[in-house]
Image (cartoon, rainbow, N blue to C red):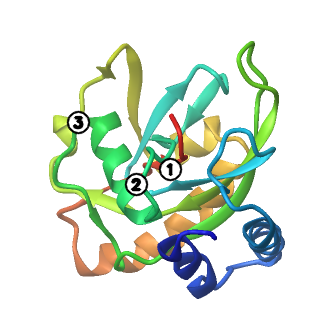
Amino acid sequence: MVARALRRAVDAHEPADEQERADLARLRAMLDAEPEPWSRAVPMHVTGSATRRVLLRWHAKQERWLQVGGHFDPGEDDPYAVALREGEEETGLTDLRPLGGERLFQVAVVPVNATPAEPAHEHADLRYLLATDRPDDVPAELEGVPLRWCTFAEAHAVADPGLERLLRRAEAVLSAVTARSTSSEAVDATETRRGR
């Protein structure tokens, strides 16, 4: 049985457009059929992410700049908690918090390149919007992996189609947040994938 926290997050989510509606339908079908949707053995497995200024991380496996993130660890079943943990681990930021509550921000099915250790597969990426009050605390590199704060324009210039969709949606939401507060910086962070 799929973890209750995961199922609740997915079932409560309202897609923003037709592409997300299709991705959400694929994810729900996979959750209905797969008892361990986070397993790397599954051709499409669950991941999750969180996104004013955008923090990107170089993903050598994907050979591009993406939001930070990682897989679920054994025993984890709450995608928001995993997104927050991964955001902290991969950025060094310990004050991350959700913008707009702990609700799932976006669902996107994204391709993952093959490596010598894994065949090509897909991630059903569960994305969250997180913010920090200490953006300058992020190092240029963490554990040998480059991190980069970008304006939205800079992020769009290096974005793949999945990140591009996230950026467009985040910009729309953040314009409303900016009207209320200018003291926080958003982190485009935390893909959550089980089994790192």
Q: Of circles 1 and 3, which is in front?
A: 1
Tell me the kind of residue under disc 2: Val
In front here: 53 or 26? 26
| Tag of residue 192 | 1
Tell me the residue at 75%/61% (across/down): 34
Mark pair 1, 3: CA separation: 16 Å
Q: Residues within 10 Å of mark 2 (few under 14, many from 20)?
A: many
Tell me the residue at 63%/55% (across/down): 125
Q: Residues within 10 Å of mark 3 (few under 14, many from 20)?
A: some
Which image quadrant is residue 52 in?
A: bottom left
Give the residue pinned by disc 2: 82
Mark pair 2, 1: CA separation: 6 Å
| Disc 2 + disc 1, Cβ < 8 Å | yes
Q: Is residue 35 left or right of residue 51?
A: right
In front here: 172 or 89? 89
Give the residue pinned by disc 3: 92
